[in-house]
Amino acid sequence: MTITHNPGPGTAAVHAGESRQRAFDAITTPIVQSATYTFRDSAELIAFQVGEVEREEYGRYGNPTVRAVEARLAALESPDAPAAALLCASGMNALTTVMLAMLPGGSHVILTDDGYRRTRQFVSTMLSRLGVTHSVVEAANPAAIAAAIEPGRTRLIITEAPTNPYLRVIDLAAVARIAREHRIKTVIDATFATPYNMRPLAYGIDLVVHSCSKYLAGHNDLLAGVIIGRPPIISALRETQGVLGGICDPHAAYLLGRGLKTLALRMERHNQNGQAVAEFLARHPRVVRVHYPGLPEHPDHAIARAQMRGFGGVVSFEVQGDLRSAMTVVDRLRLPYIAPSFGGVESLVEQPALMSYYELSSEERLAVGIRDNLIRLSCGIEDASDLIADLQQALAEE
Ligand SMILES: *Cc1c(COP(=O)(O)O)cnc(C)c1O
């Protein structure tokens, strides 16, 4: 890295990982749209094989556009200690790459509830074929994680912070301490936080995973994922990726790198909007409950305040009534689009009961903690006053 030591997130988002010497003197890092890379002669090939020169070889093993973005993400996540990043085809691909690489047949993994549903699904439907068993414990509860450890068998603890959709925030140092005592590796899916709001590596977590499709890219125009950790563990995961093949396309990497430049600005606005909207909803008579770590009544408010710079743009809330009452509120909103995902500049809204959990019955949903009157609003970067006015009219009595 050529910029100052320990840059702030605004500076790192723009400059980290970029060499001062620009290709073709272009201010932007070019999209290197090449599947393979040529060698001048056999001697250069041999020099590469014996490790005398570092260079590209074939697109599945690396790409200059991808590497530049990886370096920037690593610097954002860990400005003060060596780290490396591995870009992947999607957030799910990042998670499955970690799990396939780090969970040998017959091992055990601990997951938390209130998390990304596909992560649990991968473990229960695919890894189970390798004899990998799992425990699902309460989110944001380090004691529950400690109690689920099977000494000698547990290899990985995978949790999220903040979680989806209830935005629970776990005590990162406590999890890292428990894992270290048992020589277990820890993985945090910190997609809802981004390195702007929280940096789990600084608390001793081994690997951070993000879906870059959300805040990091920020414009709902690409899918990508990233794994960030100390360089040796990322090198090993890069080997796994070379076999599995879930690489990030250079064009997606370019768009991600472009989106990242405004990460700090966007996150500041997402944080402000999330907080303002959560406070508005908490006072509204037709809202039964608001789930947002920036509110004092949130169960993890204290640890979230200690660990996070801000609490993001996603606010989950429950309206008075049932599935239909919540549908009416969602349908009356004029600014947010009804869509899955979050973290882009435009506000999005969804009812988990109609989106990720549609095929379950109300009772089955309740059993996994998803209430029918729950709405998840992802505040974009619009003006808070407009978002609040829109919610005000959508929540008004008929
Ligand atoms: C979206 C998301 C994922 C999956 O990421 P994709 O890029 O859609 O594959 C994983 N974890 C969390 C917390 C997410 O929000």
Image (tube, rainbow, N blue to C red):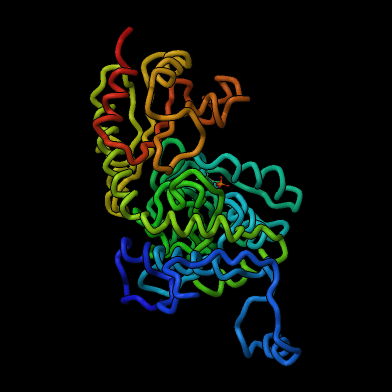
Res. 143 visible in picture: no
Residue 286 pos. (x, y %): 31, 17
> Which of the 4 image quarters holds residue 282?
top left
Q: Is residue 234 above or below residue 342?
A: below
Tell whether 332 sits left or right of 88.
left
At horizontal 70% and vertical 83% (from top left) the residue drawn is: 39
Q: Nearer the viewer, residue 320 or 149?
A: 320
Whether residue 50 is situated above or below residue 245 in the rendered picture: below
**In the orientation shown, which residue stands out farthest toward the top?**
398
Name the side, left or right, on which 211 lies relative to 386: right
- Residue 376 sits in which quadrant? top left
Residue name at image x 27 percent, y 38 percent: 275
Q: Residue at x 48, y 21 (%)?
A: 372
Q: Quadrant of residue 200?
A: bottom left
Q: Quadrant of the C terminus?
A: top left
Q: Position of residue 260 (x, y in %)?
A: 42, 57
134 or 44: nearer the viewer: 44
Locate the N terminus by quadrant: bottom left
> What residue sits 38% from the left and 38% below the top?
314
- Give the image location of residue 119, x and y in percent: 59, 45
